Image (cartoon, rainbow, N blue to C red):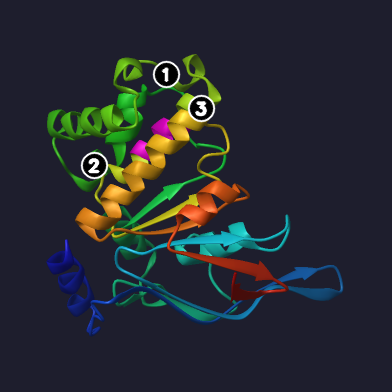
Amino acid sequence: MNEEIAMEGHEHGVEVNTGVLLHCQGLTRTYREGPRDLTVLNALSLDVRAGERVAVVGSSGSGKTTLLNLLGGLDTPSAGEVRVAGQALSELNDAELGRFRNRHIGFVYQFHHLLAELTALENVALPLVIRGQKRAQAQARAREILARVGMDARADHKPGELSGGERQRVAIARALVTDPSLVLMDEPTGNLDQATAANILSLMDELAETTACAFVVVTHDHALANHQDRVMRLDEGHLSSV
């Protein structure tokens, strides 16, 4: 995967730092609220190394989800930059950004965002199909990752037939199926029972160690936060170590 990261970076004329996978500098996000500007993130900086797991904690409304959206290129900063695998996201057009996310970034949202008309297997295989893989190959990989999150027996069920915790496990499998460089998680264990949450932590450990995948996890779960390599607190637009 490191070779792919280096290739992606050099294609756009960027020299890749193989240690730092995610780099943010001066990251600012301001929203217009009536007659005034509301600054949610204020010149924030963050570096995450390949294989590192970082938890971000903070009060509701502190901007944690906004931060994840900026890190994943789903939102545009008012100032500052985000680099993933050496690539500045601001240098990519919409099509390039979509391809880059598909190759390098996995998302686990708080509310799943699974497609209701597709089975669990089809939802998980979809990022690989979009990438251009043959359907059979994509579904074989999807079955493999569904088994790792304990959902192989429910692979042919649609989201409406699954519990909240089961849908969350499918969402996690979908984020991991592409072997991303970076996984962004928004309350990933919020709907999971203790045993399943422990399995997800174990899977994160394995991926961080064997693939150098980095994780940024927004959570209120103290056990999940303390399991990460580093815990950062977001307060008044700034990140600080806990």
Earlier residue among tags 1 and 2: 2
Q: Is residue 63 above or below residue 149?
A: below
Residue 70, how many percent across, how many down? Answer: 52, 66
Magenta-drawn stretch, dominant element (helix, strand or loop):
helix
* Of marks 3 and 2, the one in the foreground: 3
Residue 199, how many percent across, how many down? Answer: 38, 35
Earlier residue among tags 3 and 2: 2
Labelled disc at residue 128: 2
Labelled disc at residue 79: none
Labelled disc at residue 165: 3
In 3D space, how far apart are the residues under numbered discs 3 and 2 (Cα atoms)? Answer: 23 Å
Q: Residue at x 14, y 28 (%)?
A: 136
Q: Is residue 211 above or below residue 7?
A: above
Residue 122, how many percent across, how many down? Answer: 31, 27
Magenta stretch in the rendered image: 168-173
Residue 21 appears in which quarter of the rendering?
bottom left
Q: Residues within 10 Å of mark 2 (few under 14, many from 20)?
A: many
Question: Is residue 141 found inside the magenta-colored segment of the image?
Answer: no
Residue under pointer 1: 158
Q: Residues within 10 Å of mark 1 (few under 14, many from 20)?
A: some
Amino acid tagged 3: Gly
Amino acid tagged 1: Lys
